[in-house]
Image (tube, rainbow, N blue to C red):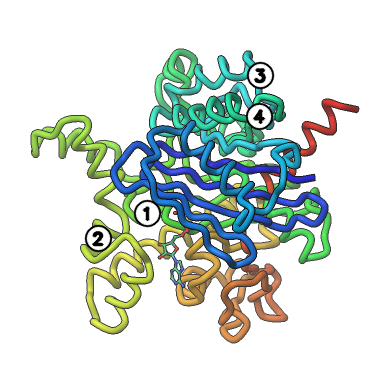
Amino acid sequence: MKVLVINCGSSSLKYRLINMDNDESLAQGLVERIALDGSSLTQSVNGKQYIIKELIKDHKDAIRLIIEALLDVKYGIIKDLSEISAVGHRVVHGGEKYAKSVIINEEVMKGLEECVKLAPLHNPANMDGINACSILMPDTTMAAVFDTAFHQTMPEFAYIYPLPYKLYTELGIRKYGFHGMSHEFVSARAAEIMGKDIKKLKLITCHLGNGASICAIKNGESVETSMGFTPLEGVAMGTRCGSIDPAILTYIMKELNLTIEQASDIMNRKSGILGVSGVSSDFRDVEVAAMKDKNKRAQLAIDIFCYKVKTFIGAYSAAMGGVDGIIFTAGLGENSPRTRAKICNGLGFLGAFIDNIKNNVTGKDAEISTDNSRIKILVIQTNEELVIARDTIKLINKNYC
Ligand code: ADP
């Protein structure tokens, strides 16, 4: 069985075709600059790259090109569209309505529409992808898999903000959390590596990419996470400020005479690692600036980031009454031994000791704690696409049983 996974943004679309018999990725690709000058599709199959540069005027055009690329005699991987058993779509926000993945039908599309106000930048693009697929692959079952769903198990005292309660009941303002598929995947894999039942573990998963979030997972369920109503809350990120004193917002708006859009732009696109370092939002550049050029602000940005992550690890250990495993994942978590070491340095009071030799690892799953560390520290490669594909298959099987 093959599942096509679609992750649709407003101007880009990532896709992957997965063989569910062995979890193998058969093809993966990226459509960029949809509806803009210089649009293109890049697909990789068995290490062979296929690049199409043509005007891709909308998401339907993008899906049409993807189908053509997958079917291409020389660069493709399938002979007939019917080989694709189902399509799994990543949907950023499922609100409170979707605590689990669902098969897409008309009613679900209405439900997704209701969630648009919670994620106005993301959900409409996700829906464009779904609509385009349903036109071009009308006979293929499709599922929606949500970034927020995994966190729907958080207790009320973790997800309600101390604001007037009617902001929750009337506007849906509460903590939702994001990166759910990644936290779910790496926690399950961690339990497997640790040889323990996830239902008996307390884990802290650190998804450290351009966007970063930390999650406390008790007995296999998310009980707390650092991103909130939006993906702006939590640790400092590439360009996002993370949690700050909310009064700063009104203060800078007043002092600098900013519009809502300008203030939002500062917090979402000009802050975080980029804002503090003034160098880049990419950790690799910032690490080079700090190490080679002795750039003090670059070092400060790294110090702030690691410190914030460390404080969340401490807080979540308290929230769960202990911790058995700390997991690092995503671009930075998987590839930066220096960042992992800096975050874990000083966590000995919890019983977490990183092994500097084992920590010198990238590109594979590994245990990086010392043999006498009570808490296991692990690096795990995330695979959000596989979570989407597995959920999609599970739903199809349930539907036809
Ligand atoms: P997202 O999916 O949120 O865009 P990723 O998970 O791809 O982000 O992570 C991107 C981040 O990972 C970037 O900040 C990048 O600098 C960092 N990163 C990737 N590889 C390395 C590396 N070898 N060393 C340090 N940082 C890295």
**Label 4 residue SS:** loop
Q: As drawn, which residue projects farthest toward the right? A: 401
Amino acid type at mark 1: Ala
Q: What's the distance in space between the residues labelled 1 and 4, CA to CA?
A: 27 Å
Q: What's the distance in space between the residues labelled 3 and 1, CA to CA?
A: 38 Å
How far from the left and from the top, in percent, is residue 395? 77, 32
Q: What's the distance in space between the residues labelled 2 and 3, CA to CA?
A: 45 Å
How far from the left and from the top, in percent, is residue 373? 68, 75
Numbered mark located on residue 276 in the image: 2
Amino acid type at mark 3: Asn
Q: What's the distance in space between the residues labelled 4 and 3, CA to CA?
A: 17 Å
How far from the left and from the top, in percent, is residue 401? 91, 27
Q: Nearer the viewer, mark 4 or mark 3?
A: 3
Nearest the viewer among 170 and 84 is 84
Name the residue rendered at 84%, 29% in the picture. Answer: 398
Q: Nearer the viewer, mark 3 or mark 1?
A: 3
Nearest the viewer among 125 and 66 is 66
Q: Is residue 192 visible?
A: yes
Mark before the other along the chain sequence, 4 or 3:
4
Amino acid type at mark 4: Ala
Circles 2 and 3: CB atoms closer than 8 Å: no
Mark before the other along the chain sequence, 2 or 4:
4
Circles 4 and 3: CB atoms closer than 8 Å: no
Name the residue rendered at 57%, 63% in the picture. Answer: 328
Quadrant of the rendering where the N terminus is positioned:
top right
Circles 3 and 1: CB atoms closer than 8 Å: no
Ligand 1 shows up in the quarter that is bottom left
Judging by the rendered image, the residue that carries numbered circle 3 is: 105
Judging by the rendered image, the residue that carries numbered circle 4 is: 99
Circles 1 and 4: CB atoms closer than 8 Å: no
